[in-house]
């Protein structure tokens, strides 16, 4: 469902009743969607920290569109901007927002999160399958970083690494690292 229609699904009380774990589950559903489409299972959800309404969401599209720039986090950032424009609003002030991501953000996503506005909070659903980038987020101005591992997100990404190692390597490190991994018998 397009983000701009989510306000019609639930009341203000409904959104305020959702926990961080509930929003992480939404991110994991987006990650599952990406995986089912042949892509990398990373989902991102951005909420207004005060109203708890979803203002942006998305998932990685490397496998689907051969687009190495659209990760779960960047897709959610783009969606939040698109929805704000549709509503006649100016640029989104992410300092009042929480970002949920199903996997620890890569360096590029950390840079975007930090550049786009020093989020009030970033919630990470998987630091098992990738090294945590919490220090980078904090150094960039994110006020709070919460590790809230989601067992489904962890299992899904582990399955992805096993079943689609080439996409995993290329997404995280590029073609050169994929070639090195194959040469060294690591993939």
Image: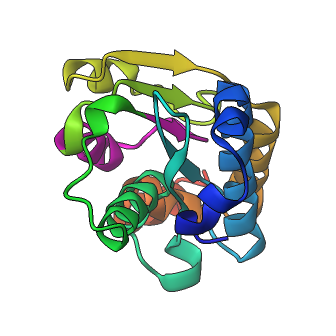
Question: Which residue occupies 36% across, 64% down?
Answer: 78
Q: Is residue 6 left or right of residue 67?
A: right
Residue 77 painted magenta: no
Colour mode? Answer: rainbow
**Residue 87: x percent and y percent?**
36, 67
Residue 169 against residue 95 in the figure, above or below? below
With respect to residue 22, does 174 lie above or below? Answer: below
Q: Is residue 180 visible?
A: no
Q: Residue at x 27, y 31 (%)?
A: 95
Q: Position of residue 3 (x, y in %)?
A: 55, 64
- The segment highlighted magenta reads 98-115
Identify the image quadrant of the C terminus.
bottom right
Between residue 126 and residue 171, name the one nearer to us: 126
Percent position of residue 152, x then y:
82, 40
Question: Can the viewer see residue 181 in this picture?
Answer: yes
- Return the residue nearer the eye: 100 or 109: 100
| Residue 21 found in image quarter | top right
In the image, taking residue 137 as reference, residue 79 lies left or right, namely right
Q: Residue at x 73, y 66 (%)?
A: 33
Instruction: Say if 58 sits above or below 23 in the image.
Output: below
**Residue 101 colored magenta?**
yes
Q: Residue at x 31, y 26 (%)?
A: 137
Nearest the camera: 108 or 161? 108
């Amino acid at each position: 469902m397009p983000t701009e229609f989510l306000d019609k699904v639930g009341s203000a009380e409904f959104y305020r009743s959702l926990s961080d774990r509930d929003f992480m589950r939404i991110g994991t559903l987006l990650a599952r969607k990406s995986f089912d489409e042949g892509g990398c299972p990373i989902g991102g959800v951005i909420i207004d920290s005060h109203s708890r309404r979803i203002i942006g969401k998305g998932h990685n599209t490397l496998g689907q569109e051969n687009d190495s720039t659209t990760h779960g986090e960047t897709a959610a950032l783009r969606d939040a901007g698109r929805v704000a424009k549709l509503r006649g609003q100016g640029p989104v002030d992410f300092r009042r927002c929480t970002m949920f991501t199903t996997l620890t953000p890569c360096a590029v996503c950390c840079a975007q999160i930090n550049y786009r506005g020093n989020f009030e909070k970033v919630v990470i659903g998987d630091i098992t399958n990738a090294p945590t980038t919490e220090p980078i987020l904090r150094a960039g101005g994110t006020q709070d970083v919460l590790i809230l591992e989601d067992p489904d997100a962890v299992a899904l990404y582990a399955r992805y690494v096993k079943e689609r190692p080439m996409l995993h390597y290329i997404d995280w490190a590029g073609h050169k690292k994929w070639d090195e991994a194959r040469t060294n018998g690591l993939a």
